[in-house]
Image (cartoon, grey):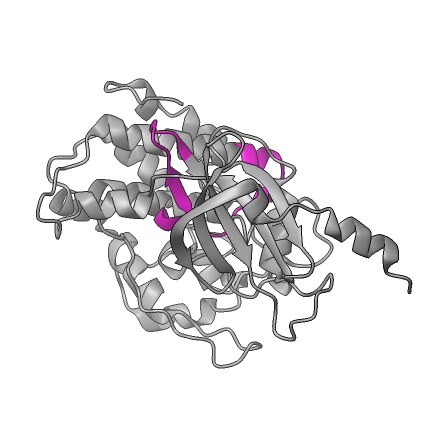
């Protein structure tokens, strides 16, 4: 094939350094590397995520990970104040890399939680209105995603960005996907979703079909973490020995059952239909101690409406779990102190 046209077109493409001045390295992962940079045109700060090639290294449509392709596809189609904004995509064919340019955030929620945690030497308890403001904006962004048939599937403090002005933005949509009338079960595309501490019980029990309720369970775990400044269900993840066999996450379920009790048929009518439900008999007779657990770990937090909202987020049956839209209208957000809504 004659590459003359494509070579001329590629030669006209602006590179990262033609448009941005890289100021420093932020972090790296399996996807690639993230850098802080500012625009040479506007001097505005951005985060630039540079994706690595998949193994093989040839530049082609399949050279980049599914996560990279998915994140680019979804973020180009959405626009909301509480979701990270995609500025542009930069393709450098000769260098065999793709970069996506996002909003730069000063902090993520994980950093904020660490600064308020018990282990921090200068710990200051998080004020109720700050908690409410973070949670409300997080729900606002998630309601937008769900209204547009998008599951995030990896909500955790490290993926929630906090801007200089206090705006909360949901980030890292590498595991996100559209869920309207999927042709195949969602598990066929991604065997494992959601970081283990925030993974919903239906996923832990092997559900092949699941809904936006998995995101709401994760939000419930994050809400509890805002209150007690430590992960609510901190289990040990059983690693996959091969890509076909998904291990049973016994320890993570045990951490959940120790606080919420072992789910019953009355609480969750469809539980017997889940592939791993046969393993529930080996857990004993744990009872729900959630209220006393929260009082013990956050003795100064006494919001009845807040606890009601939290328990609705952590209902076992995904069909009965509160939605993001319903949560935004909960009385908790209408009581003093009122949240700051960006």
Question: Where in the figure is residue 308, as x and y percent of width and height?
Answer: 30, 34
Q: Residue 112 lies in what quarter of the image?
A: top left
Q: Residue 200 lies in what quarter of the image?
A: bottom left
* Residue at image coords 36%, 43%: 220
Answer left or right for 167 relative to 179.
left
How many numbered circles does the render carry?
A: 0
Up-down relation of residue 266 to residue 43 (above or below):
below
Up-down relation of residue 325 to residue 90 (above or below):
above
Front residue of 131 and 92: 92
Up-down relation of residue 335 to residue 73 (above or below):
above
In the rendered image, residue 122 lying in the magenta stretch gets the answer no
Residue furthest right in the image: 1
Question: Where in the figure is residue 250, as x and y percent of width and height?
Answer: 36, 70
Answer yes or no: is residue 180 visible.
yes
Answer left or right for 83 relative to 236.
right
Front residue of 124 and 208: 124
Question: Where in the figure is residue 267, as x and y percent of width and height?
Answer: 41, 49
Magenta stretch bounds: 144-168
Front residue of 57 and 245: 57
* Residue at image coords 16%, 34%: 301
* Residue at image coords 56%, 39%: 86
Q: Quadrant of the C terminus?
A: top left
In the rendered image, residue 159 lying in the magenta stretch gets the answer yes
Residue furthest bottom in the image: 241
Question: Where in the figure is residue 154, as x and y percent of width and height?
Answer: 47, 52
Answer left or right for 327 relative to 231.
right
Answer yes or no: is residue 319 visible.
no
Answer left or right for 86 relative to 37.
right
Q: Quadrant of the N terminus?
A: bottom right
Q: Residue 60 lies in what quarter of the image?
A: bottom right
């Amino acid at each position: 094939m004659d590459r003359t046209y494509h070579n001329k077109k590629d030669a006209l493409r602006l590179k990262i350094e033609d448009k941005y001045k890289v100021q420093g390295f932020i972090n790296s992962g399996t996807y690639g590397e993230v850098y802080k940079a500012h625009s040479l045109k506007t001097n505005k700060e951005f985060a630039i995520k540079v994706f690595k090639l998949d193994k093989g290294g040839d530049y082609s449509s399949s050279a980049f990970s599914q996560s990279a392709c998915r994140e680019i596809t979804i973020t180009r189609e959405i626009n909301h104040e509480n979701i990270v904004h995609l500025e542009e995509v930069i393709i450098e064919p000769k260098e065999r890399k793709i970069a996506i340019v996002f909003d730069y955030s000063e902090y993520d929620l994980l950093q904020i939680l660490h600064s308020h945690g018990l282990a921090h030497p200068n710990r200051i308890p998080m004020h109720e209105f700050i908690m409410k403001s973070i949670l409300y904006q997080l729900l606002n962004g998630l309601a937008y995603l769900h209204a547009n048939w998008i599951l995030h599937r990896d909500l955790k403090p490290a993926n929630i960005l906090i801007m200089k002005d206090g705006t909360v933005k949901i980030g890292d949509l590498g595991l996100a996907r559209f869920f309207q009338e999927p042709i195949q079960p969602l598990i066929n595309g991604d065997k494992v979703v959601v970081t283990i501490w925030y993974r919903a019980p239906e996923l832990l029990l092997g559900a092949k079909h699941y809904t936006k309720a998995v995101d709401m369970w994760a939000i419930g775990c994050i809400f509890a973490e805002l209150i007690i400044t430590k992960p609510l269900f901190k289990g040990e993840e059983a690693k996959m020995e091969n890509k076909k066999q998904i291990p049973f996450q016994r320890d993570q379920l045990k951490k959940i059952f120790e606080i919420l009790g072992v789910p019953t048929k009355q609480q969750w009518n469809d539980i017997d239909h889940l592939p791993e439900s046969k393993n529930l008999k080996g857990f004993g007779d744990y009872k729900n101690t959630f209220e006393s657990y929260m009082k013990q770990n956050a003795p100064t937090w006494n919001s009845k409406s807040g606890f009601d909202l939290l328990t609705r987020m952590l209902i076992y049956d995904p069909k009965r779990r509160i939605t993001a839209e319903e949560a935004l209208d909960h009385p908790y957000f209408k009581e003093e102190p009122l949240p700051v809504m960006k």
